[in-house]
Image (spheres, rainbow, N blue to C red):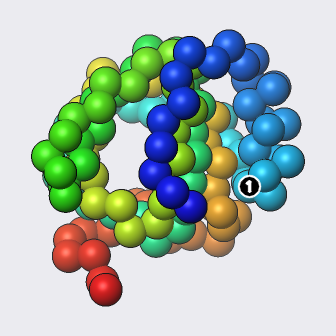
Amino acid sequence: MERGIESGLTLTEEQAVEKMLALGLHPVVVEVPPANNEFHWHDFDSVFYILERGLNVTDMETGQTFALVEGDWVNAPGGFAHREEHDGFKAVFGFSVDPATREFPLERPLPVPA
């Protein structure tokens, strides 16, 4: 999966779930609590569609910060080192693995294995 952001979409929650199912992902609607976390990574691919509010994501490799808002569709491959800062947001997440089989927290500390 390649990293990327598609902005300005107007999907409903149901449409986002359907799109993720069509991609073979495991969709979950999440009300994410506020966070200001350290750089970390995930050991699975994911996508998410922001339904309400937004967040800032900083790419550790480039130092670039992305301001993500309602209507943004984000592709986040496993191993992408990043950090998040936000006051909470609601999104549909699509995971490449069943989240029920994962250990929590989902964040993995640095370094990212080669």
Q: Residue at x 53, y 67 (%)?
A: 44
Q: Nearer the viewer, residue 33 or 63?
A: 63
Where in the figure is residue 80, as x and y percent of width and height? 36, 61
Residue 92 in the image: above or below residue 72: below
- Residue 90 visible in this rendered orientation of the protein: no
Residue 109 found in image quarter: bottom left
In-image side of 33 versus 61 (left or right): right
Q: Quadrant of the N terminus?
A: bottom right
Figure label count: 1
Q: Quadrant of the C terminus?
A: bottom left
Q: Around disc 1, counting alpha carbons within 10 Å, would you say few (fewer than 14), some (14 to 19), or many (20 or more)? A: many
Q: Residue at x 43, y 18 (%)?
A: 69
Where in the figure is residue 48, as x and y percent of width and height? 57, 39
Q: Residue at x 53, y 47 (%)?
A: 75
Residue 88 in the image: above or below residue 5: above
Q: Which residue is outermost to the left?
A: 63
Where in the figure is residue 81, as x and y percent of width and height? 28, 60
In-image side of 40 versus 30 (left or right): left
Which residue was labeled with disc 1? 25
Residue 101 found in image quarter: bottom right
